[in-house]
Image: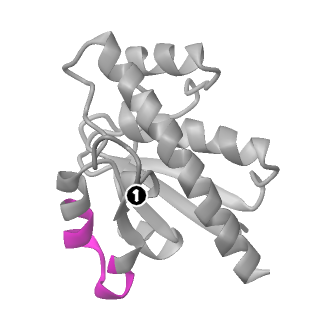
Amino acid sequence: MSDFAVLFVCMGNICRSPTAEGVFRAKLRDAGLERRVLVDSAGTHAYHVGSPPDKRTQRHALQRGYDLSKLRARVVEPGDFSRFDLLLAMDWDNLALLEQQAPPQYASRCRLFLSFAPDAPVAAVPDPYYGTERDFERVLDLVEQASAGLLGFVQQQLAQRG
């Protein structure tokens, strides 16, 4: 049983959200909190259910020390809204889809991931799928920045919960 739970969400769960899952798991491990915080990722669309992250995503993440090879894509499920304290969308479209699916009592749990990186140059993590190698690096840059802010937020939540 975890004390806090975070779900990262993008469209297909093969690029951005598994990157965020891997990066944030590493931040939690470094902070000694991996046993207290449940981390997962999912997609708003069932395009790639059961597939590993995109090979480019895995390659770029591994170059920074994040191993995403064991992750498998899944789709957001109704129970996720009650199970996770935060459902963090990578962009506005996926946030809107989450908000449409969320039962009213859980709508406030849905937020933009980059809201935890107020100094980021953009408000949403751009989808690198049809982009260049540089786009995958940019996703990692943004995810690392937002993960640092999210870690601080989660540490505050854990302290308040005792």
Q: Residue furthest front?
A: 119
- Residue 120 in the image: state x and y as whole percent: 38, 44
- Residue 56 in the image: state x and y as whole percent: 39, 15
Q: What is the tally of numbered marks visible in this picture? A: 1
- Residue 139 in the image: state x and y as whole percent: 38, 30
Left or right: residue 125 compared with residue 88: left
- Magenta stretch bounds: 97-107
Name the kind of residue labelled 1 in the image.
Leu
Identify whether 94 is placed above or below 78: above
Q: Picture quarter containing residue 73?
A: top left
Can see residue 72?
Answer: no
Identify whether 102 is placed above or below 147: below
Q: Please report the residue visible at 77 percent of the width from the left and 41 percent of the height from the top.
A: 30
Task: Indicate whether residue 103 is drawn in magenta.
Answer: yes
Q: SS class of the residue under badge 1?
A: strand
Left or right: residue 145 compared with residue 123: right
Viewport quadrant of the N terminus: bottom right
Q: Picture quarter containing residue 153?
A: bottom right
Q: Residue furthest bottom?
A: 105
Identify whether 26 is placed above or below 64: below
Q: Please report the residue visible at 26 percent of the width from the left and 51 percent of the height from the top.
A: 44
Residue holding disc 1: 88
Left or right: residue 90 compared with residue 72: left
Q: Please report the residue visible at 37 percent of the width from the left and 26 percent of the height from the top.
A: 138
- Residue 74 in the image: state x and y as whole percent: 39, 45
Task: Indicate whether residue 127 is drawn in magenta.
Answer: no
The 10 Å Cα crowd at callout 1, few under 14, some 14 to 19, many 20 or more, is: many
Which secondary structure is most common in the magenta stretch?
Answer: helix
Identify whether 95 is placed above or below 9: below
- Front one among 69 and 160: 160
Can see residue 12?
Answer: yes
